Amino acid sequence: MTQPILYIVVPCYNEEAVLPITGPMFLEKLRELTESGQIREESRILFVNDGSKDGTWDEILRLRQSDEHAQGLKLSRNQGHQNALLAGLMTAKDYADVTISVDCDGQDDLNAMDAMLKEYQDGAEVVYGVRASRETDTVFKRTSAQGLYKLLRLFGAEVVYNHADYRLMSKKALEGLAQFKEVNLFLRGLIPLVGFKSSSVYYDRKARLAGETHYPLSKMIHLALDGITSLSVRPLKMITSLGLLVSLISLIAVVVVVIIKLFGYTVQGWTSLLCVIFLLGGVQIFCLGIIGEYIGKIYAESKARPRYIIEKNTLEDKPENTENSQNP
């Protein structure tokens, strides 16, 4: 297999503090891969500015001025991490043979790219970067993250355990991904549905170099709910099963009450009656909430609004031509 053109896609949101540190790291890694003959000179790093409110875009432009291998993609507004990543991948698809997506915070081990490219050369169209361990995480973060993956699998979402968005995708895999038109994106669960030969590369994740994390617990829970409702109808089936179970229990309770009444006993207990009413009311509201989530997804999909709008793509900039005047 010939040397591929690699595009490293880096979503950025309010990363003014960390970009001056990680930007040169990405460029150095790209230079190493080029000099070792693993990729071609036309390879680039594509920084995707997801509507940042700070000076992230200015930092991207400064990196581009210092090295032409750094390019930028500016979205018209904040669209969220998943949409920003998709925008970068779909843009890079037209220029690259293979892409590697990686977060901007510098936590992912860039040396794992060598192993990813090796797997690609061996025939893999998708290579997942998987954390070897979570020993560096706090107990709370480790427990919540592992619980998140288990929850996703429980509800039928097909995800790779301990994998986030650090992955290699070939042009063929990207073209397959482009055929998925849904607005509610959960790429961790969507990409396994694309198919093709895949493999995994294990690495150790480091601490964030600067700035603050953009994925607190609340956002992780929201991401999990998006993944479940976007990829699985199992919660709706569970509601059906729950409804049948409650109906069966209610039928048994009615029979018991009637028998007690026939034998002349007085059915007492306002407390128990109110508990049953509150319990059934809570179950009904919870079920309506789940159904409402799915209706909201259907509404968003039916609108077919664009998932992102690109304001600026530096890859489309033409180099300035300087005309050299010649003396007759």
Image: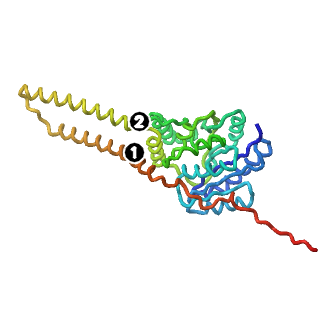
Count the marks.
2
Question: Which residue is located at x 48 percent, y 41 percent?
Answer: 140
Considering only vertical position in the picture, is 289 above or below 123? below
Residue 237 in view, yes or no: yes
Q: CA distance from mark 2 to mark 1?
A: 11 Å
Residue 83 bears which disc, if any? none
Q: Quadrant of the N terminus?
A: top right
Label 1 sits on what residue type? Tyr
Circle 2 packing at 10 Å, graded few (<14), some (14-19), many (20+), is some
| Secondary element at tag 1 | helix
Secondary structure state at the residue bearing disc 2 = helix
Residue closer to the observer: 88 or 143: 88
Q: Which residue is mark 2?
A: 234
Quadrant in which the C terminus is drawn: bottom right
Numbered label attached to residue 294? 1
Note whether 48 is above or below 322 in the view shown.
Answer: above
Position of residue 239 in the picture relative to residue 314 (left or right): left
In front of the other: 236 or 28: 236
Q: Pinpoint residue 311: horizontal percent, then vertical percent.
A: 60, 61
